[in-house]
Image (cartoon, rainbow, N blue to C red):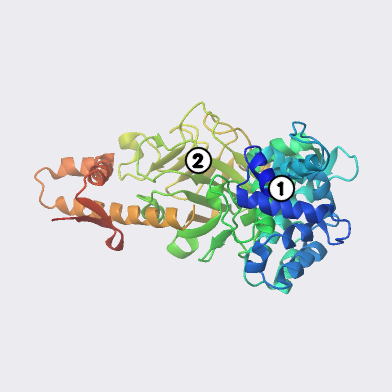
Amino acid sequence: MSSQQQINKLLNRYPFDEEELELLFRCHEALVDNENESSFLLKMAKDSPYSFFFLPGDEMKSRVEFMEKDILPAEFGEKLEGSISSDSFVDYANEGEEKMLELFLEGVAKCCGRRGPNEAFRIIFDCCCDGDQKEASCKKLIDLCYRLSICKDILSVPNIDKSAILSRLSKHDSPSPALGKSLCGASGASQVTRDVFIQWADINAPLFASVLSSFMHTLLFHGKPFPKSRTPFLKPELYQASEIFESSDSPLLFSLASMSPSMGGKWHRLYSSEVDGRSFNRLEWSLLGYSGPTNLLIKTDKDISLGALVSTTWKDSGGFYGDSNSFLFQLEPTTKVFHPVGKDTNFIYCNAKKMSVAQDGLPKGLGFGGNTNKPRLFIPESLELCTAGYLDTTYEQGDLLPKESLEKFNIKTIEVWGVGGDEAINEALRARAEYREYTSSTINKARVVADKKQFVHDLASGVVYNSLYEHREKTRGRAEFRVDDSHDGYVLDRE
């Protein structure tokens, strides 16, 4: 049977396109060639035609050898090959050599994340086990994922600085001690079973699966765009200074990138208490109207880090709002993520209205979970004497602070970053600019309206805010209006 006939036969059985299958056929031929003494990873990389265009000459060989010698754990390539070749797939179309090919294709599909995250988690776990052991070291699991993320970058950038990479690795005994502590806490020991690891990763570090799939995709399909149906692992890129992260290579950034796809890629700082001033009014000004995902980060006076991913537009409201894509987290000393449980919908609370608590009975500040009387996480307008509880009916239960903190903390630094990548950030900044412009023009109208008292009440109660978004939706639906990106507003087209 010719290669083309084989490809046509297997196209419907495996999650690869024709071009990818042809490439994988070549890789498999190299693997079964006993005269080829190259390592497993080198065979996979060098037999890809993409490597000659992206990294010509011996550059690909040099980088793979650098990874195997200095970055990846010893015997990783052998363990990965063994895990790919494990005979856990039984529904084959062929026997003999063709069955070996199918076994290889199925294993690569799992490594590339095309059979779901649990299969990728399983392979990561197997690569950290010695022999027939049923448990793996927590430290080894975290370390492997971190190093795979570095290797993905080594294979995908035009130039690398090997000494800088090695220096970064030498800074920390563990790349993310907070993640390791969290995983060990899930098992109560320094070793975990596969089931415990998968369950833990699914909650706290779901993008560990994307670390492996991104590495394998880059190794095999150099320069080819990542499939739109898959989630790549992207390290956060901060273009402004932060008081929370010691550097752009902080292990905490790896922990955050492992939590959600929104945490990867470009970040844009919206607020910093160190730069913008320790003021709730300034914090409010930076957030209101911003329509993209945001990462709120807090470092306490005890050097504990915690925060929240907010997935919806920030608005001043006397009640809760938001959606189930938001979550809370403790970042260090232990990394834990608390997702919505689906019972209540008290996701976000932002009350910055000028009325006093005595007037409307509502606390002023930012809150998450719980209720208006006692949010799970609450930052009052004074930015002092904050609370972080263990339990509520919106988010999963667990400690946002170490138990000895007694659910109370004071803020050392608070930052809010726009996340989600360039497109999401740019659109959200346009929405915020539009909100500010509309709010400013509406306030100016107070000088001419007859009933100023009613106007001020509408402004405080959110009527003005709601009118803005009603206006936006109406204009977006009219053909004669179009968004004017250069001036953060709309243009009326006339024939």
Name the residue nearer the viewer: 37 or 227. Answer: 37
Amino acid of disc 2: Ser
Location of mark 1 (residue): 2
Please name the residue shown 69% across and 58% down the image: 219
Name the residue nearer the viewer: 26 or 54. Answer: 26
The residue sitting at the top extreme is: 343
- The answer to the question of whether label 1 and label 2 lie on touching residues, with beta carbons closer than 8 A, is no
Residue 192 rendering spot, x and y as whole percentages: 80, 39
Visible residue check, residue 176: no
Name the residue nearer the viewer: 104 or 179. Answer: 104
Name the residue nearer the viewer: 7 or 472. Answer: 7
Earlier in the chain: of badge 1 and badge 2, it is 1
The label shown at residue 326 is 2
Amino acid of disc 1: Ser
Residue 185 rendering spot, x and y as whole percentages: 75, 40
218 shown above or below 198: below
Marks 1 and 2, how far apart at CA: 51 Å
- Mark 2 surroundings: few (<14), some (14-19) or many (≥20) residues within 10 A: many
Residue 141 horizontal side relative to residue 50, left or right: right
